[in-house]
Image (tube, rainbow, N blue to C red):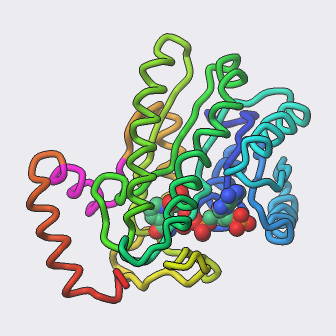
Amino acid sequence: MSYFKDKVAIVTGSGMGIGKATALELCSHGAKVVLNGRNPERLQKTLEEFKGKGYDVTAISCDITSSTDCEKLINQTIETYGRLDILITNASVSMREKFEKLQPEVFAQIIHSNVNGSAFPAWYALPHLKKTKGSITFISSAAGMIGMPTGSAYSAGKMALTALAQSMKIELDGSGVHVGIVHVGFTQNEDEKRVLNAKGELVPVASRPAYLQQTREQVAKAILRSIKGRQFKTVLTVIGKMNAFMVRFFPGLVIRIITYSQKRMKDMYE
Ligand SMILES: NC(=O)c1ccc[n+]([C@@H]2O[C@H](COP(=O)([O-])OP(=O)(O)OC[C@H]3O[C@@H](n4cnc5c(N)ncnc54)[C@H](OP(=O)(O)O)[C@@H]3O)[C@@H](O)[C@H]2O)c1
């Protein structure tokens, strides 16, 4: 029997992208999944797609940057399923602009989305996860290991998630709750994926070489392995693992390599 059978999971930002793929993977292993996103039409479409496959899912449309919305997300989950075993904080917004051009309010919005957007659902979920000795997984990025050009606020937010996960892991020692962080690498994006520009407008993501990208399904499977293995830190892709090693032992060299590649691969950064 699957480890995930009949477990109740919330995946924030699961109307599309990696969150949707992760929710699908959980459902295919027998979990009951709460889908989430802000766009009700997209969420409804995803919900119907999942129900069409016979999965036990529900959808709660709310904004994870609002503390009251997160309280609603957790309370409605408990009302529907009576328990919570897994929280995956996946929803966030990214960016593509140099720090000096980014409006301060946009900087704050990205930090808010990446940090509070994970901390708020985790805070409301924690009492329920203690009862089930469940699991919280924060979705981070390779950009959460080293500050990336045109990604200052995003990198800062993802690095803050590492500190949050570390603090929680220490504080929750002995409680039975698993805390994990998954550093996702370049992943094939949905065509509709948008990120913020300097003025806070939604724009398409920068192009990336296909050979550097994992599929969303590969990422989803890795997230489930990380939860099942109750791992603290998981780094995806060969480049991500090399990056983690290099950042730890040769951070100055990594910064020089990224500075060089930024000049050679302008499309990826602008
Ligand atoms: N794609 C990559 O290459 C990559 C690489 C490294 C890390 N990651 C990380 O992986 C995670 C998912 O990325 P993705 O590429 O799948 O993103 P995506 O395609 O843009 O999907 C993001 C999802 O989050 C939802 N969302 C965004 N803000 C929200 C909010 N405030 N409240 C509720 N839902 C919200 C969006 O739906 P609504 O718009 O309807 O709210 C959407 O369903 C993110 O944490 C990202 O940083 C991605």
Can residue 216 be seen here? The reply is: no
Q: Which residues are magenta?
A: 235-247
Q: Residue at 82% of width from left, 52% of height from top?
A: 55
Q: In terms of secondary structure, what is the magenta stretch mainly?
A: helix
Examine the rendered structure and indicate whether residue 190 appears above or below residue 256. Answer: below
Examine the rendered structure and indicate whether residue 214 appears above or below residue 86. Answer: below
Q: Residue at 79% of width from left, 41% of height from top?
A: 68
Residue 234 part of the magenta segment: no
The x and y percentages for residue 229 are: 46, 33
The x and y percentages for residue 265 are: 26, 86
Examine the rendered structure and indicate whether residue 86 appears above or below residue 105. Answer: above
* Left-right relation of 34 to 168: right
Q: Residue at 84% of width from left, 31% of height from top?
A: 78
Residue in the foreground of this view, choosing between 133 and 95: 95
The x and y percentages for residue 230 are: 47, 31
Quadrant for residue 141, please give it.
Answer: bottom left
The x and y percentages for residue 173 are: 46, 15
* Left-right relation of 23 to 60: left
Residue in the foreground of this view, choosing between 261 and 33: 261
Quadrant for residue 193, please give it.
Answer: bottom right
Give the residue furthest to the front. Answer: 104
* Left-right relation of 5 to 220: right
Give the residue furthest to the top. Answer: 174
